[in-house]
Amino acid sequence: YAKLINLLSFDPTLFDEHQLRSHQINRTPFIKIDTIYIISPEILLDHIFTNTHYSLLESPIVKDEYKKRYSNYFLDHISSICSRFNYKEEKREVDLYDGKKELGDLDLILIHKDGRHLVVESKNHSLPLNVYFKDLKATEEHLKDLQNKWESKVKRRYEYLKKNYAKLGLSNNFKYIIISRFPEIISHFSDLTIISIQELEYWLETENENLSFKEIYERLYNKEDHFSKEDLKELQSSGFWLFKATPASS
């Protein structure tokens, strides 16, 4: 057991606050202080998923197959949600070329029962850790990086589709959306429709309203009745103190 314990024991000298893939504590969840080990069941459970995920990603033998399966699982999830709104998957991973110039690929093309198409690009990536933990400066840098290195390529594909939709067998009223695994800051700053997988169902419910992301955000998140009375009672029973803010008297 000594080898396994040493392998999973946190080493402060290996900790790197700029590591963007996973937190060191998730890779090595045993915290040793003198002769005592501190083990958190919650961190240990997180570790099982995180360590398995990155061990497979880091393996030169299985990483390509694992990435492909992981991507397909995300696309299957998107396709499954869309199927509840009368969409059927038509094509997957369609390569685009403008002449000999490669433009990338379209992850999913779905067709509605009324004949219109939905083109989906998926963004199945983890957020950098400092963005995930809401570091403002890191989030601003992440936004610039997305705008400079990612958004421009997506827009080139979209512009090509608008001019050449018939070549790909798309209806002239097709819609084009990007679905990300995690909420992305660029959703607030782009004229593209970029929503998270958690927001997809609401987008499909309101698709015919042609809502902007700002309108979707306002409806989903800026609601006073975000928690029901049952939710609040459950929070209280779990030991949370609840307070209601009142306007300050003049």
Image (cartoon, helix red, strand yellow):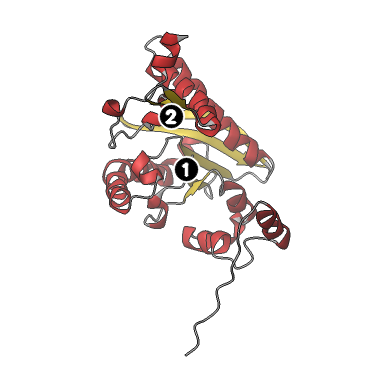
Mark 2 → mark 1, Cα distance in angstroms: 19 Å
- Asked whether the viewer can see residue 156, the reply is no
Is 50 in front, or is 97? 50
The image shows residue 131 at horizontal and vertical percentages of: 36, 45
Q: Residue visible at 38% across and 50% down?
A: 134
Q: Label 1: which residue?
A: 182
- In this picture, is 166 found above or below 25? below
- In this picture, is 107 found above or below 239? above
The image shows residue 121 at horizontal and vertical percentages of: 46, 39
Q: Residue visible at 44% across and 15% down?
A: 5
- Amino acid type, callout 1: Phe
SS at badge 2: helix
Is 180 in front, or is 137? 137
Q: Residue visible at 42% across and 18% down?
A: 55
SS at badge 1: loop
Q: Earlier in the sequence, mark 2 or mark 1?
A: 2
Which circle, 2 or 1, is nearer the viewer? Answer: 2
Q: Label 2: which residue?
A: 26
The image shows residue 159 at horizontal and vertical percentages of: 37, 46
